[in-house]
Image (tube, coloured by chain):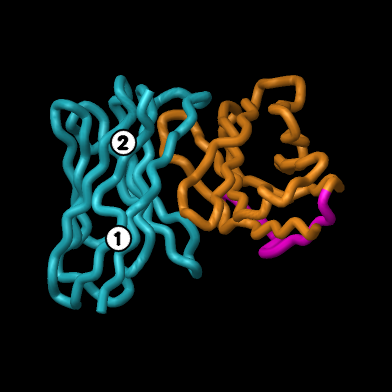
Amino acid sequence: AQKITQTQPGMFVQEKEAVTLDCTYDTSDQSYGLFWYKQPSSGEMIFLIYQGSYDEQNATEGRYSLNFQKARKSANLVISASQLGDSAMYFCAMREQGNQFYFGTGTSLTVIP
Amino acid sequence: KAGVTQTPRYLIKTRGQQVTLSCSPISGHRSVSWYQQTPGQGLQFLFEYFSETQRNKGNFPGRFSGRQFSNSRSEMNVSTLELGDSALYLCASTRWGGGLQETQYFGPGTRLLVL
């Protein structure tokens, strides 16, 4: 079974609008970490936001927020006030204790002027 | 603080050859992980090194190998290259590599093309 599932291969959003990128995960661990990365066309992976499994509040980092629903095992990324520079691939990842990162297949986001 | 650096950035090889890629982690980081990224497969974990020891390994054939030096720099080697090895190879570093909160910081990657 896939550890991380991103069901949206591609998304479009109008500039200045908000967009939600979906991510569901599969784990039987109680302790785990969830991450979102952005990958522009240059190829470098840029860390955006982290959510711990025991964190009671949703993580926020500037225009990025993580909608964490533990019971549904979902960790959706919300980008508010989209900018043209947000056009990129976005990857959801999970880390279980002591293990490597598991990445989803990514969502390609295009911001339309 | 300098980020993760990878060399070379681009590489063209022919089938059957071997290749060595290099990664220098962020200063103070002791864990280095390698990933292969292809359009169809996404990011696939290759292996992780910590303090010169391989700590985790993904599901790749033995043609893929790596090592880590005492200064935490890491190399990965692919022998007997196949066309399917064409990919972006990403290196990532963390300070310890064992904490849930530890963020992996990635290098710019090496784009390998096998002809």
| Badge number at residue B32 | 2
- Quadrant where the N terminus of chain B sits is top left
Would residue B30 be found to the left or right of residue A24 on screen? Answer: left
Q: Is A70 located above or below residue A43 in the figure? A: above
Mark 1, residue position = B10
Say which amino acid is labelled 1.
Tyr
x, y percentage for residue B19? Answer: 17, 61
Colour in which the image shows chain B: cyan
Asked if residue A70 lies left or right of residue A29, the reply is right
Q: Which residues are drawn in magenta?
A: A3-15
Name the residue located 78 percent from the left edge and 60 percent from the top edge.
A112
Q: Is residue B37 above or below residue A45?
A: below
Horizontally, residue A91 falls left or right of residue B70, namely: right
Q: Residue at x 48, y 65 (%)?
A: B41
Does the magenta segment cover residue A10? yes
Disc 2 and disc 1 on one polypeptide chain:
yes
**Closer mark to the observer between disc 2 and disc 1:** 1
**How many circles with numbers are drawn on the protein?**
2
Q: Residue at x 74, y 61 (%)?
A: A11
Is any part of residue A36 visible from this angle? yes
Rendered view: B40 above or below A39: below
Q: Secondary structure at mark 1?
A: strand
Q: Secondary structure at mark 2?
A: strand
Foreground residue, A89 or B30? A89
Chain ID at mark 1: B
Q: Picture coordinates of residue B71 (x, y %)? A: 17, 26
For the residue marked with disc 2, what is the amino acid?
Val
